[in-house]
Amino acid sequence: MSSVSPRILQVMMAVLRDRHPEVDLSDVQEPAAGALKRLLAPLAHCRTRDFDPAAFPRRMANSMKKLIAASARLHDRNVATEADVALAVEILEPKVDFIHRVATAVPDMNDQVSRRAAIRRQFGGGEASPQEVMDFLGAASRSTVMRDLRDIGVKSSYGKYRIPTEPFADCVADTVGSEEQEKENVECLHRPPAESATWVRELTAAQISTLAPEDVQEFTPDELGLMARDQFEALGPEQLAGFTPEVLRQVPAYPFYEALTPPQVSSMRPEQAKTLLACNGEIDGWGNVKQLDDAVVTVLRTIMSGAAERN
Amino acid sequence: MTAGREKRRTAQPVQHLRPVEPCAPDRFLGQQEDLRLSIEAYYRLASSASKDDATRLPELRPMYIDAESAAVAAAPPFDEVTACNSVAAVLGATAPRPARLVARVTGLEVQEVWAINGREHAGYVFAFEDSAGRQICTPLVFATPLANAALAAFHGGAPVEVVGFIIGLPARRKRTPAYVPVALRLLTSACAAVAATPEEIAEAKLLIRQHRHDMLPWMVQQLRKINGVVSDGLPIEFELAEKATVLQAASTGQLKNANPRIHILLIGLPAAGKKLVAAIVKILEPVALPAQASTLTRAGLAAGAMRRKNALVAQAGLLPRAHLGAVVIEDLHGLRPAHRDQVYAVLAQAMEDGSLDLSTAAAQHFISQTGLYFDLNRRSQLKADSRLLEGGPRAMLADIGMPLHILSRIDVVIELSGDAEDALKCAMAMLTDGEDHE
């Protein structure tokens, strides 16, 4: 087969385009419609929150017209045939495959990063219960889901977790013990809730004792309760012992009571216990009257009575 | 100057031109009148050039009248070669060949108005921009129909095919080449866009007749020979991409209110053959303008504003300049994030409407029936970012770096996934066939 120069191939295409500016598609309307329907069938049930393939069918119809006409034109015809439809379908199939793959792509549930990103995408900006997340993920176990929710979200009321839309910045404690770390630990209380929740575990009682009341009241009303609750859940007994009564007096304004447990309050000092008992029953930041747990109240009274006996 | 002819200098902005007459495509405008007045323009320039040329004016005068008669005799239909021969006779030069120019009108100004035998004639200077972005200015041309057609093309944003001739204008004892337009028509023909000669068209027609029944495989085979692609071990996706590119070159005018050209996206690993497919686009399209994604901007794609004298004029970008052809954007993953939204907005309009409306300082409308060819690597193949591998629709779209609304507008999407065994077979064939391959 003799070879033809690129220039002549270019002129051939130009001649064909000028010769058949429009191609008659009337003979292939039905086969084309049928082929398009079959082609788009896999996309019919691919609608998800992240991906809506509704834009594709109309644009695919235009693409099909263009391809059928181009095929007829290429073969020096101004009337399309079923062979042109077949070629158009062959060319369009990879696009449908690709879109189908995109639409039905699911995160790898064994990979922590993928799983947590999927949870954020699905529930970000709202609340979710562990059961809802398990239903969404399908295969993940309850303990895995609980761990994910604790790490990426913030526990809310009614056993649900508030899920942020974006991941929190990593707080890698690679400088634990240094002055820089101590400073950062305190600053951590000013950060958004879930981020600081992982950090308060690193705080020492001495560091907590340096907090001023305004440090606890730093946050916006939306973050207020969540912040306190999340942080206090994470605090150990020794850490709680670091709170000054002035700071602690600010605390009951937040939904703090639910978070306190008897082991946590067991190391409290008498003045702290007195403060807490005095604040019991106040209206919290969400407008609800909160009561200390009976077991916690018992422990606090024990601390108080112990102090009175010593005196 | 001759008696009865007086001239007065004026400078009028372009909007003071007379109302634009409807510009019929595929039809020469002005014809003999244009020719006569173009020659008149030559007179005007010659008279102000040098002493030597000025002394020749009386000799030229009767020849000018002869040339006018000759041009009138040559029509209809207007014959470009005869027209140029007539000009050559007037100028006493060797016959200039008609020079065709596919360009866009970027400026049109009334430089002077002459009163000749009681009639006023405006002298225009045209500015064109060819598909390579070169600016071409003409000498003074006295042709109102031509100017009206140019004005219509300017406002309509359509590229034009200009027929004219190149003459050596006397300037400071040298003869500087200048382009004198004789006729101007809207560019609607692909043959005009490739500036095909009658001989080339005849050869092309013969080949079309011979291969009309097996055109696609024959064309693909020819392209493989030209590009040095061996047929062994080619993945099926690569073959599909070749076919799609040939069909892209054959796409035109099927949709009324949309861009009739086919748009292609190839996704693939490095060395998957994306460049070879891009080479096909460059061979087959009448105009194929390459673009590197890393340097793409909205102004570069659509149009930028350029200061000319005291006004801002739009300078066409790649998309309008490649009207009837294609823009080849390789390595789209390299698109700079700062420009991504703007570039995609321009691409979306061009892909959907086949035109561009700019509402910037130099507001302008451009017709841009341009095919687009994109290729890209998945970003996860180029950089270590765990978020790209998370899975799920959003992560997959982020991996190709393309929003959904652009993806849906692309007609053909092919992912070139090379099979290792096929690739090895292909590599062996490349080594043994004795030819060089890219």
Image (cartoon, rainbow, N blue to C red):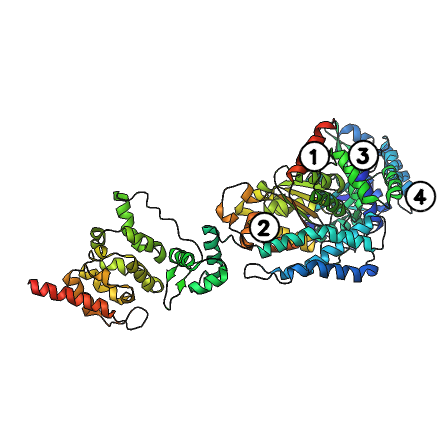
Callout 3 and callout 2 share a chain: no
Q: Which secondary structure, mark 1? A: helix
Q: Name the residue under label 2.
A: B402
Residue ID for mark 3: A5
Q: Callout 2, which amino acid?
A: Met
Residue B235 occupies which quadrant of the picture? top right
The location of residue B99, given as percent across then percent down, is: 80, 37
Mark 3 touches mark 2? (CB < 8 Å): no
Q: Is residue B120 visible?
A: no
Q: Mark 4 = which residue?
A: B73
Most distant residue in the left direction: A311
Q: Are marks 1 and 4 on the same chain?
A: yes
> Viewed as shown, does residue B257 lie left or right of A17?
left
User: Do badges 3 and 4 share one subunit?
Assistant: no
Badge 4 density bin: few <14, some 14–19, many ≥20, Cα 10 Å: few
Q: What residue type is labelled 4?
A: Ala
Q: How many marks?
A: 4
Check chain identity for marks 2 and 1: say if they share one. Answer: yes
Amino acid type at image mark 3: Ser
What chain is tagged by disc 1? B
Q: Mark 1 points at which residue?
A: B426
Give how far apart the Cα atoms at labels 1 and 4 are. Answer: 64 Å
| Horizontal relation, residue A276 to residue A226: left or right | left
Instruction: Identify whether B366 is placed above or below A158.
Output: above
